[in-house]
Image: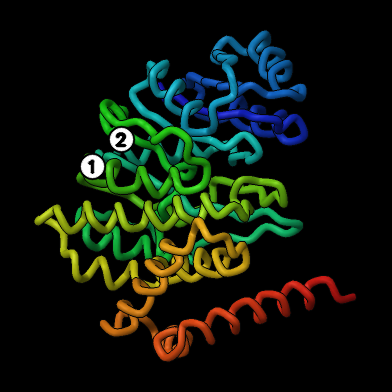
Amino acid sequence: MISIIVPIYNVEKYLPKCIESIINQTYTDLEILLIDDGSTDNSGLICDKYASIDNRIKVIHKKNGGVSSARNIGLNEANGNYIAFVDSDDYIEKNMYEKMISIINKYNVDIVSCNYNHVNGKIEPFFKLDKDEYINNKTKLIEDIFQYKNYDMILFNKLYKKNIWKNIRFPLGINLAEDLMMLYPTINLANTFYCLKETLYNKITRENGLTNSKKIDDYINNVLAYEDFLLKVKQNKTLDYKRIYKSCSEGLFRHYKHLLDYLYIYNNTKYETLEKEIEYKLINMYNKGMLSEKNQKKIFLLKLNTKLYKKYRILSNKWKKYRGKRK
C-alpha cells in the first residue's frame, strides 16, 4: 500500500482536481492522507466531502503550523509500505503510482522519481530526458541533481520505501527550502534510485504560492539549506565532496546573490553583519574559481569595490522592476 500525504492550506480552487487525480489512480491500493493545516476557506469541507465517498481517504484537521508540520503528521499516521507526497494545488497522471510501484518491484530500488511538468498557461516538462536511468552511485546522483539532469531535489515526484522516513521528519517553521533540507537525509538512507523519463506529475505555478515568496527569511533558509547539505556531504567520506561541491556551486552562488540583492534592497541595519558575510562568501567563491566565467565576471565588481557593487545591484533591480511595469 502507498500512503500519499497531501498538506492542504487554502487551495479550494485547485483541491478537487488534485484529490480526483489521486483517487482515480490505476494503482488502487492507496491510503490518502489529507492534512488540512487550518484552512480558512472551503478546503477543509472539500476534504470531508471526498472522505465521505472514498474510504481510502483520511482527513486530519489541525491548527495552522505550516507545510512541514502537516507533512510530519502525515508521516506519523502513514500505514503504507511506501510514502509519496502531493502538493494540494497540483495534479498527477492517472498511472503515476502504477508505473512507479512496478519499477520498485522490478529493480528493488529504494526511491523512484519521475519527470514532471510545469503548468503555467502551457505545459512544459522540467527535464529533457531521452531514457530512464538506474543509479546506484550517490555521488553521481547528487551531481546530476544539481546540474538539473534528473531526479531533482523536490519531494513530490518521488515514491519512497517507507523505511527511508522511519526516523526523519521535516524541520518546523520552514516553508521554502524544506525539500532541499530533506534531500541529504533521504539520499543517505537509500542505496538505489531510478529516474523515469516520463512526465507523471503536474506542478501548477501560482503567483501567490510559497515558491514565489520574496521574504528575506525564505532566502536565508535556502542558503542555510544549501550550506547544511554541503556540510553533511563533506562529513560523509563515502561521497566525493569536491565533485559534488563543483556541481552545487552555481546553485549556491545563485542563492547567495539573490539573498544579497534583497538585503541591499531592504537596507535594514539588523542585516548588516549577514550582508558582509554573504559578500565575503561570494568573493571567496570567486577567488577559488568555483564559478562559471559569466558569474566570475559578475562578482569581479564586488571584489573590486563592495560599495559600488551594492549601488549597481540596487539600480539594476530597480530598472528590472521598471521594465516589468512598462506596457
Residue located beneath label 1 in the image: 190
Image quarter where the C terminus lies is bottom right
Q: Residue at x 22, y 70 (%)?
A: 243
Place of residue 63 in the rendered image (x, y in percent of width and height, measured from the top left): 58, 18
Say whether residue 135 is left or right of residue 252. Answer: left
Crowdedness of circle 2 by 10 Å Cα count: few (<14), some, many (20+)?
A: few
Q: Where does the image place residue 196, in percent across and percent down from the top left?
A: 42, 52
Of the 4 image quadrants, the one containing the N terminus is top left
* SS label for mark 1: loop
Say if 240 sits above or below 90 in the image: below
| Figure check: 118 above or below 39 | below
Residue at the far right: name it.
327
Mark 1 or 2: in front is 1
- 134 w.r.t. 49: above or below: below
Is residue 169 or residue 107 the one in the foreground? 169
Q: Residue furthest front?
A: 269
**Residue nearest the viewer, comparing 215 with 115:** 215
Q: Quadrant of residue 34?
A: top right
**Dot 1 amino acid type:** Ala
Q: In the image, what residue occupies the spot 66% across and 46% down?
A: 209
- Residue 98 drawn at (x, y percent): 46, 35
Residue 284: percent from left, percent from top: 30, 77
Label 1 – label 2 distance at C-alpha: 16 Å
Q: What colour scheme governs how the chains and residues are painted in the rendered image of this protein?
A: rainbow
Give the labeled residue for mark 2. Answer: 105
Residue 179, picture quadrant:
top left
Residue plotted at (40% across, 37% down):
159
Mark 1 or mark 2: which comes first in sequence? 2
Amino acid under label 2?
A: Asn
